[in-house]
Amino acid sequence: MRHGGITTGILVGTSLAALAVAVAAWIVSSVDTGNDAISSADLFQVEQGSFEITVPASGNLVAQNQVEIRNTLDGNAAIAEIVAEGSAVNAGDILLRLDDESVRERITDAKETLVKAEAAVEADEAALEITRKSRESSMSAAAVSVDQARLALLAWREGEVVSQRNALKLAVRTATKDFNRLRDKYEKSLKLRERDFISQNDLEQDEIAMIRAEAALSKANLDQEVYEKYTFQKEEQARESARTQAVEEKDRIDQRTAAQVRSAETKLEASQANLVSKTDRLDRLEVQLGATTVAAPSSGMVVYGSTIERDRRNENESALRVGSTVHRNQLLIVLPDTSQMAAKVKVNEALSGLIIAGQTAIIRTDALPDQVFEGTVHSVGVLAEDGGWRDPNRRDYSVRVDLHDISTYSLKPSMRCTARILVEVVDEATFVPVHAIHRRGRTTFVYVRANNGFDERIVELGRSSDRYVEITGGLGGGDEVLLRDPPAGSVLSRIDESAPT
């Protein structure tokens, strides 16, 4: 059984190996076959036990959490002040200051432009108000004109027309009555003249009066007819036209003044948009001015971006220092939290499928070779990375292992490290060291001690690590296997390669 994690597993496997070596030394101190002697260290006695399947890996230490500080200024800027690399800083400490002269000059220009933009908005607001009031006055006058034309038409129809028609009718009736009266009088005068009661002159005077009355009746009828057929329609058209013209003029004034208002509104909107743009620009510049002084957002150790990116840095570029020119979004400083570290290691593509999150691991660093750190696999990379120009055919996956209980140790990012990731513990198994296994074609066998030599024996293999392999058939407890090639003439029996496997 496994006790005490991966470290205990390694100790168990090592103890079994030591026990087997001791037993082998007790049974046979050596097998001498000529000049090639077999020592007890070359033999392994097979017993039941446990061993761990681990995957080796190597890489660097990284901080589990780190903050990147980048240049957020538009354009380039020179470093005026910067904290020393490797310094430990707390949240709020000043990390660096950038030259802010150009930003301050732009802020001054932006403020002047903003004042002009504000004045333009005020002028356009006043112009819009004047245009709106002018529209209201014009529309009010046009509405009055329309009402006056409508009232004039109504007064004409209900007043002048009625009065004129009544007058014409009265004239016709009066002329008719006058004509009838004078005609009757003339007819009576004719009878009186026949009887010689009146003179010829009186008769003629009555005839003339009748003719005049007839002419007046004809004129009255003609006046009435002309008024109804011509005068009335002419006056009606004129007054309708006046009303229509007033309505159309009102519509034209409405459209014209509405266009003037829209134009004034558009101009004001443009001025307001320009004011917003100028205000935003000043706000951005104020933010830019604030960005010239960079404070630590959290505690950590100062690492220059030029150090992080030294492999990608142009050979003409130097490390960050006072006077260095930095560009927008350039990585300036990284603040790793060294209280929580992880190992970023590479695992060969062939073994990467064995690694899953949650597995335990043992980490050793080159800086502290005698110290062993325990960790847990946090994640496995999605894509494989090639080995670069040194080994273009190699394919590795990045694995992050979070370290535990490191508070008493001074670990830093980029420290070289190695890892052994525990994949599985093989319990209560028969196993031998991997270098005891030999292959001939598709046949797998071991050399088992027999008398003063060795026999080839076919074995069936199970699970394996980089040190041990499980034997599922072919060996039993107490068998001794050779951990190297046998000396010449020491093989007593060989396997039948023609026999079916």
Image (cartoon, rainbow, N blue to C red):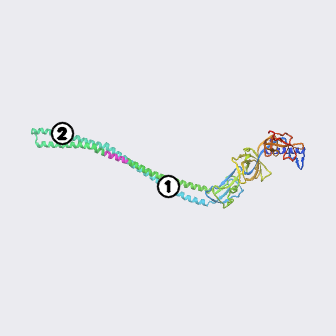
> Which x, y percent locates residue 426?
79, 41
Q: Residue 155 carries which label?
A: none
Classify the position of the N terminus by image quarter.
top right
Q: Which residue is drawn at 53% across and 57% down?
A: 115
Extreme residue in the front direction? 498
Tag 2 residue: 181
Is residue 240 in the magenta section?
yes
Q: In this view, does 22 lie above or below 301?
A: above
Quadrant of res 13: top right
Secondary structure at badge 1 equals helix
Q: Distance between the residues labelled 2 and 1?
A: 86 Å
Query: Callout 1: few (<14), some (14-19), or many (20+) C-alpha neighbours within 10 Å?
Result: some
> Which x, y percent locates residue 432?
82, 43
Residue 466 visible in the shown view: yes
Q: Residue at x 28, y 44 (%)?
A: 230
Classify the position of the C terminus by image quarter.
top right
Q: Nearer the viewer, residue 487 or 63?
A: 487
> Which x, y percent locates residue 183?
17, 39
Amino acid type, label 1: Glu
Q: Which of 52 and 255 is in front in this view?
A: 52
Question: Main structural element of the magenta stretch: helix, strand or loop?
Answer: helix
Q: Is 345 on the left-hand or right-hand side of 102?
A: right
Q: Residue 122 carries which label?
A: 1
Query: Callout 2: few (<14), some (14-19), or many (20+) C-alpha neighbours within 10 Å?
Result: some
Magenta-highlighted residues: 235-246
Secondary structure at badge 2 equals helix
Extreme residue in the bottom direction? 323
Amino acid type, label 2: Arg
